[in-house]
Image: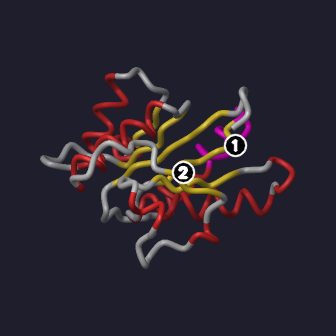
C-alpha cells in the first residue's frame, strides 16, 4: 500500500436484511470514503453485509479504474494462504493475506484477524447489533475501544 493510501474494512452479522435504505447508506459511505482517499478495502467474512460492501466496492472499482481500488481478502488461518477454502475465488480479489499467523484455533484466529484488520483501517464499516457471542459486535467494541473512525449501520436502522 502507498504511504498516503487509506484503508477501510467491514464487518457484519452473517444474516442482515439488505434493504434499499441500507444499500443507499452504504454506497454513500463508500463514495465518501473513496473521495477521502480510501483505495484498499479489506474483507474477511462472507456475511450478507460483507457481500453488500463487496458488491458496491466492485462496482466503484469498475466505474473508477484510474483510482486503483483494491479488494483484499484477509484469511484467519495461515494455512488458508497455501490452500484456500473451496468457496474462495482468487480472481474476485486483487490480493489476499493472513494478517495474524500465530493462531491456529478457528474462533480465536477470527477474532485476532478482525482486530488486525481494524488496526490497519482508517475507516471501519459495520452492521453490528449488540448480540451475545457475535463476532461482528466484538469487532465493533474493539474498534470503539481503539477510537477508530467507524460507521455502524445497525445503529441507524
Left or right? Give the position of 106 relative to 82.
Answer: left
Write the residue at 46% across / 47% down: 10
Q: Along the line of sight, which residue is nearer the eye, 30 or 87?
A: 87
Write the residue at 61% across / 60% down: 56
Kindly identify which residue carries mark 2. Answer: 26
- Residue found at the far left of this picture: 132
Please say if 73 is above or below 122: below
Location of the N terminus by quadrant is top right
Please say if 121 is above or below 153: above
Q: Residue 34, position in %: x, y?
A: 70, 41
| Structural distance between the alpha carbons of marks 1 and 2 | 16 Å
Write the residue at 47% across / 64% down: 82
Please say if 56 is above or below 2: below
- For the stretch drawn in magenta, the main secondary structure is helix
Please say if 155 is above or below 14: above
Q: Is residue 15 magenta?
A: no
Q: Residue 128, position in %: x, y?
A: 31, 46
Kindly identify which residue carries mark 1. Answer: 39
Left or right? Give the position of 35 relative to 86.
Answer: right
Q: Quadrant of residue 117?
A: top left
Mark 1 vs mark 2, foreground winner is 1
Per the rendered image, the range of residues in magenta is 28-37
Write the residue at 31% across / 62% down: 14
Left or right? Give the position of 16 relative to 104.
Answer: right
Q: Along the line of sight, which residue is nearer the eye, 99 or 156?
A: 99
**Nearest to N terminus: mark 1 or mark 2:** 2
Amino acid at each position: 500500500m502507498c504511504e498516503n493510501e487509506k484503508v477501510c474494512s467491514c464487518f457484519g452479522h452473517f444474516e442482515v436484511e439488505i434493504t434499499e435504505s441500507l444499500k443507499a447508506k452504504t454506497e454513500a459511505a463508500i463514495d465518501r470514503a473513496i473521495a477521502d482517499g480510501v483505495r484498499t478495502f479489506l474483507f474477511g467474512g462472507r456475511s450478507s453485509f460483507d457481500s453488500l460492501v463487496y458488491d458496491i466496492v466492485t462496482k466503484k472499482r469498475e466505474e473508477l479504474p484510474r483510482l486503483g481500488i483494491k479488494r483484499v481478502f484477509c484469511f484467519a488461518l495461515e494455512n488458508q494462504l497455501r490452500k484456500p477454502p473451496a468457496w474462495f475465488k482468487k480472481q474476485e480479489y486483487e490480493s489476499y493475506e493472513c494478517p495474524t499467523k500465530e493462531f491456529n484455533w478457528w474462533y480465536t484466529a477470527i477474532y485476532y484477524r478482525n482486530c488486525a484488520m481494524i488496526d490497519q483501517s482508517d475507516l471501519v464499516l459495520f452492521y453490528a447489533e449488540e448480540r451475545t457471542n457475535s463476532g461482528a459486535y466484538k469487532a465493533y467494541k474493539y474498534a470503539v475501544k481503539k477510537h477508530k473512525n467507524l460507521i455502524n449501520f445497525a445503529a441507524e436502522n
